[in-house]
Image: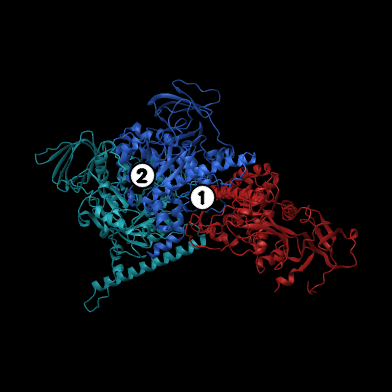
Chain colours: A cyan, B blue, C red
Amino acid sequence: MRKFLKFFIPGFLLVVLVVTAGVAQITEKAEFGKFAITNATIHTVSDGVIENGVVLINGETIEFVGKNAKITSGYQRINAAGNHLYPGFMDAGTQLGLQEIGAVAVTKDQAELGEFNPHVRAFTAINPSSVSIPVTRVNGVTHVVSLPVSGRLSGKATLIDLYGYSPDSMAVSSNAALHLNWPTSRAGGRRSEDEVEKVYKKNLKELNEFWDRAVFYDDMMRSYEEGSADKKRPDTHKKLEAMREILGGNIPVMISVDHKRDILNAIEWTRKHPDVQFILAGVQEGWRVAEEIAEAGLPCLVSTLYTPERAYDNYQRPYQNPAKLHEAGVKVAIATGEIENVRNAPYHAGYAAAYGLGREEAVKAITLNAAEIFGIADRLGSIEKGKQANLFLSDGDPFEPTTHIEQVFIRGYKIPMVSRHSQLYEEYLNRGAVENEGH
Amino acid sequence: MKKIVLLFFALLLSLGGYAQEKGSVLITGGTVMTITDGNKENTDLLIEDGIITEIGRDLSAPGGVEIIDASGKYVMPGIIDAHSHIAAVDVNEWTHPVTAEVTMEESIDPNDINMYWALAGGVTSIHLMHGSANVIGGQNETLKLRYGGDMDALRFDGAPRTIKFALGENPTRVHGQRFNVQPRTRMGVEQVVRDHFDAALDYRRNRREYLEAREAYKEGAREEAPVPVAKNARMEVLVDILEGEIRVHCHSYRADEIMMLMRVFDDYDIEDYTFQHANEAFKIAPELRKNSAYTSVFSDWWAYKFEVYYSTAFNASILNASGVINSINSDSGELIRHLNHEAAKTVHYGDTSKQDALRMITINPAMQLGIDEKVGSIEEGKHGDVAIWSGHPLSIYSLAEATFVDGKKYFDRDEDADDMRLEVNPADDFEHADRRWYEEHGRRGGTCLRGAEIRFNEQEMQFRYQTN
Amino acid sequence: MAVSLPGWAQPAGAFENVIIHTADGEVIDGGTIVWRNGIIRSVGAEEEVAIPFDAYVRDGGDSLHVYPGFIDGMAFWGSPDDNGPGGTPDEPGNPGYERAGIQPQRYPSEHLKSNDQALEKAAEMGFTAAVLGLEGRMLPGQVDLFFVKGNQTPDNLLERGLGVLAQFSEARGSVYPSTTMALMAQFRQLFYDAKAQHQQQEYFASVSSNYPAPTNEKVLEALYPVMELEQPFFFVADSKENIERMLWLQEEFGFDVILVSGKEAYKTAEELRRRDIPVLAGIDLPEKPDWMSADGEENNENDEEGGEEKDRNTKQQEVTEEMQHFRERQQKAYEERINNIKSLRESGVRVGYGSNGLKISDIRKNLLVLKEEAGMMEPQLLNMLTQSTADILGYGQRLGDVKEGRLANFTVFDNPFTEEKAKGLFSVSNGEVTELESKTSN
């Protein structure tokens, strides 16, 4: 959208940017070890709410969740009386870490050239030092799926947590999904319906051709791998090689699709690939075809803070979309599509809650559901013994914009509750009187 | 259902052409959030012929006046958005660094559905602003969301004139970088402002002298025929700024450029100005306070361009704590739908009190637009621009249930129909829709630079993108 | 005419045994029409009209139809394309008049191309006179009235500078004015500057020395007649809001104005009538939504062209409640739009015809829509295309009807002109006959 801006960014500005980028880094270190959180209202997500509960963290892991625990002296105690404890929130669709400044093209790594790029990986380009990362996590969002966005097959999205010094240490699933921008058949802009139809058919044909080639490649390679020694090894093709884990059903395809007719087309298409896992993302008109999505058994990644798709849509539809999908039996998770403001993910969930989904389901949609959709619910998504310690304490309902997040844990690390934003606050609040004026 | 739709339409359509209809209503038993005089529980609010006439207990409705039971609910002044571009035909006359002569008053789109969606978020007035591609842009227009009315009916009668200025990346990018026309730098931006103010002062003198000489010549009191000085639309507006008849709302981000403009304004005795966006205003809160400058900021937008990289969501709280009159604005057709929650974020970021948070979307923007005598709080004698909320408006679970402008209901959740378009183009496609979900956020459309951005996209810029 | 004899004009001409349709709806079967020196001398039933001895007579065989020549109140036939200087000027904010599309000093008569096919086609469609303008932007030029005579049209100027064409049309590319609001400001500034220049010219003329010479900017001078109400603006505006903006300008500067095109003029009919602003209405009607032609609920009789669409549509989608509602509103909007002219007439607004760029080949299609869907009778359509347009142009006594004393402008058709198969056979413009069929067949 704002790609064109790169033309305007002069070189010297970039130099300034590079030189100063380190200034506002975090100085306080995260703590790691044993923590005992006591007197909290624990929202386990998987097993109800525990009042005045205790959670013990040992290293990366949640060691205990319950009411009465013996806390030995090795634990750093955190008295959370009056506070609520939630599993870390997960935003299942963002570009966090892939872009630093929207209008500065050289800081944007989410859009590789080319239509079919299953081999490019968001994981590779995640910048662990992105200023947006601390800004996000201190709001209770501990995990994000970050996705490449250009072309038809944009590349592999990555699922990371928001603490670490390298992509490797942050990655939960370095290849979390393959992002497919579904070719649209909807009218839009000034194109006539016939033109749209023509372009759609062409795009779909290209997609199918690529896909068929990938299937052929996979079959061929498997035949070679299973076969006898006299077979000559076929040449490797990076793009097709990258499709093999998709075709094998190990990694899902995340299909970005919003419009009703596109959703139906996409569903039909997924039926032709029964061995592949699919997730729908965006799905802004999901409410129009909720039954069909449910029937197809496809989970949906959705947000709420956008304007209605069509001018004649009811104003509430974006807010109600998650609820309508859920009512039809679709598993929904929150995905904001945001970058520097992924921190608003809780409010997307809050709107879903307020407009029909209810609080309990909305909390799931931003925790456990996302973990289940990406196949990591054994480790993440709820406060359970044995799971990874991704948690946060808040002084109230985290969906309320007036609530404060008091403490965040990621992978057992007690995260310093600072960010560029809070540092600037500390520095400039009560800065002092007007300085002497001199001309 | 359909009947309701049609009825509602008949109602809306009947408004067309009739300017600024007013209504009466008695809203009983709610928590009245006066903003200027605290919250009053179990209180009735009487609006008669568009004006709040009584706030108190056990009020009775004059004959024929509708009574709405708001017990258990909150009654809040209509939200005022000090920075909006909805309901606009064009947003930016971006071709010249100074386009003071154009006015959004003449660029209103009275059929924009976004107005209805904003009403559904409790908004009753917007400051329809010109874009930010010019150092001195066009004049803005303050509107009331009398959805269904024509261009005239939407005007906020008696609102002072305002004009858009813009500093920093946008004007230097558009003019300096793209057109090779000053300003290319923040140094140049200052001089564009000063040059034009000086030219306006010269124009005022020359034009007055000419008009006097013309009269004198006509009456024979002067022998020499005067040389005409043509009336100049641009200069007239600049003169009005210098004479204090137009308030400046300046798009700005960096602290240094804000300081620059305050120095310039000081030199030309310009007062009553507001810095819009002002992401770095927090750095110079004491200076803003000293100059009685207003600020109108985003709750949390940042990092979309270089000049907002070193900004903080705590901006509003710092400004508020420093005594700067600040408002939270939308600049977006999406954010305007939940400005109450945008304001609530000031509690989250920096512990602004809930009362002050509410002021930032009611009385504070009203002050910045010069309409605080009329709207922005619930007081007897003020306009009946109010919304009824199901709960405390800063809660994410609260919904606007009804929104009134001048005592007339323009949004009612119970009667809310699906298709609220005013204008139907027979060529519209039933399935028409654009965008990808991850490109969705308000900032990526409908914002300050919209006029310019649309053109950049559609014309040469695409080419430039490809060749860079 | 099959044979042309240069240098010799027939003293008089006549059609007999023709069906004559007058602008006020009268139909004369077996009629005769006689003209001499470009003026209609007599019109009437056979027995009432004497054909002079020196008249060249054509026989209509009781089946040909004579209609008053249609008048296009605002056409761009023969105009060079609007492809003046493009690119980005040194200062996009100060592009100069020409680059900004401000050229009110231009006269079509000095720029028209005679080889524009539209000029031929216009005659075939029944047009014998037209106000022609130049393609352009905000102020593309003056408008001139011509007799329509195929490629001879540019040499058949009837009146130069009937008015000044104006429209809310931004400058091309990245140039001021690029928005509607800047167009408004630009209109004002032009008036201010014209006024000042005019004043200085007057002062200069009134003294003999000791006074600086004024500029003599032709662009500004071309606006004096508008300011002094000697010339109207031919103002193109379609949306209700743009028409209202035009009205704001009129209120401010008090010029005379004729509204051109006016697709949504019906929404401001009351005010147009109050200000006595006539409309040269366009008939570029919206496309009928596919489903309306396909469905056939209301329009069974018109199913021929919709047939193909029908298959595709019904296959594609069932009609949901939501879609039904959408369609109801779409249909209402469609009907409002095609009823524009009818509504205007009913509100007492004077309505003539101005094609404003509509392709000639689309005229009949749209006339048919007006007749069959908007319920306008053929005589009403005829009146709009002839007398009513002539009245608006100030030519009500010379053009617009087949009556004694009028200029001999009429067309002979083989069928009533609203019928799809109707074909113009002879075009008579300013008394000169053009036989159309021979031209179309090559």
Q: Residues within 10 Å of mark 2 (few under 14, many from 20)?
A: some
Query: Mark 1 falls on what kind of element?
Result: loop
Residue B278 location (% of width, % of height): 36, 43
Residue A335 location (% of width, % of height): 33, 50
Which amino acid type corresponds to the residue marked 2 in the rendered image? Met
* Quadrant in the picture for the N terminus of chain C: bottom right
Write down the chain letter for disc 2. B
Instruction: Reply above or below: B436 against A28.
Output: below
The number of numbered discs placed on residues in the rendered structure image is: 2
Residue B279 location (% of width, % of height): 34, 44
Left or right of B345: which side holds C234?
A: right
Residue C183 location (% of width, % of height): 55, 51
Residue tagged by mark 1? C320
Marking on residue B260: 2
Left or right of A334: which side holds C319?
A: right
Residue A7 lies in what quarter of the image? bottom left
Instruction: Reply above or below: B13 against C154.
Output: above
Query: Mark 2 falls on what kind of element?
Result: helix
Which amino acid type corresponds to the residue marked 1 in the rendered image? Thr
Left or right of C167: which side holds A418?
A: left
Cβ atoms at labels 2 and 1 below 8 Å apart? no
Q: Do tags 2 and 1 sit on the same chain?
A: no
Write down the chain letter for disc 1. C
Can residue B338 be seen in this snapshot? Answer: no
Can residue A58 be seen in this snapshot? Answer: yes
Query: Spatial distance from mark 2 to mark 1, Cα to Cα?
Result: 59 Å
Residue at image coords 55%, 34%: B21
Out of B133 and C439, give the one closest to the viewer.
B133
